[in-house]
Image (tube, helix red, strand yellow):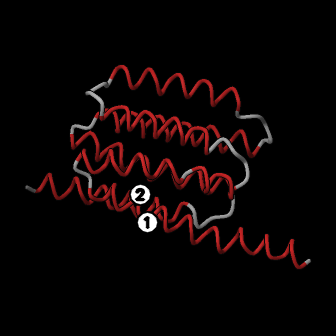
């Protein structure tokens, strides 16, 4: 019973970090906060026995650190996208537990593409399908914190879109 409670608390720590992710307008902050969230979900998915989700989040954490460094140095992430995509596929094969694993694999492949973009607006918009796929995986895996993470991440993306992106569009039209 206590382990189940601890498992869900860990998920909710990941949840709070994930919601905070998209309230930054800097690529590095988005990727590093997302890394911290992914690390919490690695632990939670291990405790839930959802090993594909755990390995995908672990890969995502490393990927986010690499992307943040490459973008900061103004280097291309194209090679990293290919390498991480292959690692994701390999991780999916190694942890395969049936069709549910496809959700985690597809979700991480999509996020690997979305985080490769340098503009925060593009990262936010490309993350929408990621949330949908992971939400289903979380529900099946028994992670209510994961489901809430995806719902609130979608809300956070919408909020950030209006805070940052609509203002820029208005300034472009009016300015």
Tell me: residue 158, above or below residue 146.
below
Q: Which residue is drawn at 30% across and 30% down?
A: 99
Residue at point 42%, 35% (across, down): 56
Q: Give the farthest residue toward the left.
A: 1
Q: Alpha carbon of mark 2 to alpha carbon of mark 1: how far?
A: 6 Å
Instruction: Name the secondary structure under disc 2.
Output: helix
Q: In which quarter of the image is the N terminus?
A: bottom left
Disc 2 crowd rating (10 Å Cα; few below 14, some 14-19, many 20+) is: many
Where residue 22 sits, quadrant-wise, is bottom right
21 lies above or below 56: below
Q: Of all residues shown, which one is farthest toward the bottom?
A: 174
Side of 137 where 127 appears, left or right: right
Q: Quadrant of the C terminus?
A: bottom right
Please provide percent x and percent y for residue 76. 76, 34
Which element is circle 1 on? helix
Mark 1 is surrounded, within 10 Å at the Cα level, by few (under 14), some (14 to 19) or many (20 or more) other residues, namely: some
In the image: residue 3, left or right of residue 65: left
Residue at image position (88%, 79%) is 174
Residue 107 location in percent, x, y? 46, 40
Residue under numbered circle 2: 150
Q: How many marks?
A: 2
Residue at x 17%, y 59% (from the top left corner): 5
Q: In which quarter of the image is residue 125?
A: bottom right
Evaluate if marks 2 and 1 touch, with contact meaning CB atoms under 8 Å apart: yes
Q: Position of residue 142 (x, y in %)?
A: 22, 50
According to the image, label 1 marks what residue? 152
Q: In which quarter of the image is residue 54?
A: top left
- Outermost residue, right side: 175
Residue 65 - label: none
Q: Position of residue 136 (x, y in %)?
A: 33, 48
């Amino acid at each position: 019973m206590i382990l189940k409670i601890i498992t869900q608390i860990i998920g909710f720590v990941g949840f709070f970090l994930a919601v905070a992710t998209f309230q930054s307008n800097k690529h590095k902050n988005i990727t590093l906060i997302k890394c911290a969230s992914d690390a919490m979900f690695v632990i939670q998915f291990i405790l839930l026995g959802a090993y594909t989700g755990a390995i995908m989040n672990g890969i995502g954490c490393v990927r986010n650190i690499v992307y943040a460094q490459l973008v900061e140095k103004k280097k291309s992430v194209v090679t990293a996208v290919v390498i991480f995509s292959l690692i994701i596929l390999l991780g999916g094969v190694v942890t395969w537990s049936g069709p549910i694993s496809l959700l985690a694999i597809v979700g991480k492949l999509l996020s690997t593409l979305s985080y490769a973009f340098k503009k925060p607006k593009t990262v936010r918009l490309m993350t929408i399908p990621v949330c949908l796929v992971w939400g289903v995986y979380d529900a099946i895996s028994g992670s209510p914190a994961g489901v809430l993470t995806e719902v609130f991440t979608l809300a956070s993306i919408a909020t950030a879109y209006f805070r940052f992106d609509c203002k820029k569009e208005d300034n472009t039209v009016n300015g």
